[in-house]
Amino acid sequence: MKLKKGDTVKILLGKDKNRKGKIQKIHTSKNKILVEGLNIYKKHVKPKGEGQKGGIVEISRPILVSKVALICPACTKPTRVGYIIAKNKKKQRICKKCKGLIDG
C-alpha cells in the first residue's frame, strides 16, 4: 500500500467528497484506511449495566483506499505516488506531479 499513517488525503467519492484529513489507521488486509474526522456515522447504543447511559454515538468508519488521493506536502495537490531508489539503496516515495519527496 502506498499510503502511510499520518499522510494527508483528499476524499474523492462519497458524502465527504473534496474534504481532507489525516490517516489514523490502515487496514492492509481489507484495503481500507481510517481518516480522522471523516466518514462519520451514527450508531444507536443500548445501556450496558445500571450506571451507563444509552444513546446515539458518532463513529468513524474505514474508507476504501481507491476513494482517496494523497495530498503532496510540497505542491499541496492530490497526486499519485511513485517510487525512486536513492543512492543509499532505500526506496522513497515521490509525487508524480512535482517529483518531490514525500516524507514518511
Image (cartoon, helix red, strand yellow):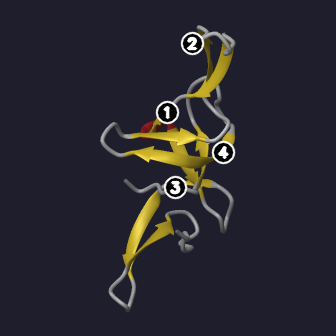
Question: Tags 4 and 3 in contact by the CB under 8 Å rule?
Answer: no
Measure the C-alpha gap from mark 1 to mark 2: 26 Å
Residue at image coords 48%, 57%: 4
Q: How dense is the environment of label 3, judged by Cα within 10 Å: few (below 14), some, or many (20 and up)?
A: some
Disc 1 packing (10 Å; few <14; some 14–19; many ≥20):
many
Q: Quadrant of residue 86?
A: bottom left
* Mark 4 → mark 3, Cα distance in angstroms: 11 Å
Residue labelled with disc 1: 62
Residue holding disc 3: 5
Task: Estimate how packed mark 4 is, as few (under 14), some (14 to 19) or many (20 or more) residues with alpha carbons within 10 Å.
Answer: some
Residue type, mark 1 in image? Pro
**Which residue is rendered at x = 57% and y = 73% of the image?**
100
Q: Give SS at disc 4.
A: strand
Q: How far apart in space, not on screen, are marks 3 and 2 (Cα)?
A: 33 Å
The percent position of residue 88, horizontal first and vertical second, equals 37, 91
| C-alpha span from label 4 to label 1 | 13 Å
Q: Secondary structure at mark 1?
A: loop
Determine the residue located farthest toward the bottom in the rendered image: 87
Q: Position of residue 64 (x, y in %)?
A: 44, 35
Pick the front one: 85 or 37: 37
Tell me which amino acid carries mark 4.
Gly
Q: Residue at x 57, y 12 (%)?
A: 48
To which residue does mark 2 refer? 48
- At x 55%, y 63%, the residue is 97
Image height of 56 relative to 72, above or below: above
Secondary structure category for the residue under label 2 = loop
Residue type at numbered disc 3: Lys
Tell which tag, 3 or 2, sits nearer the viewer. 2
Q: Residue beneath label 4, please?
A: 21
Q: Position of residue 84 (x, y in %)?
A: 39, 76
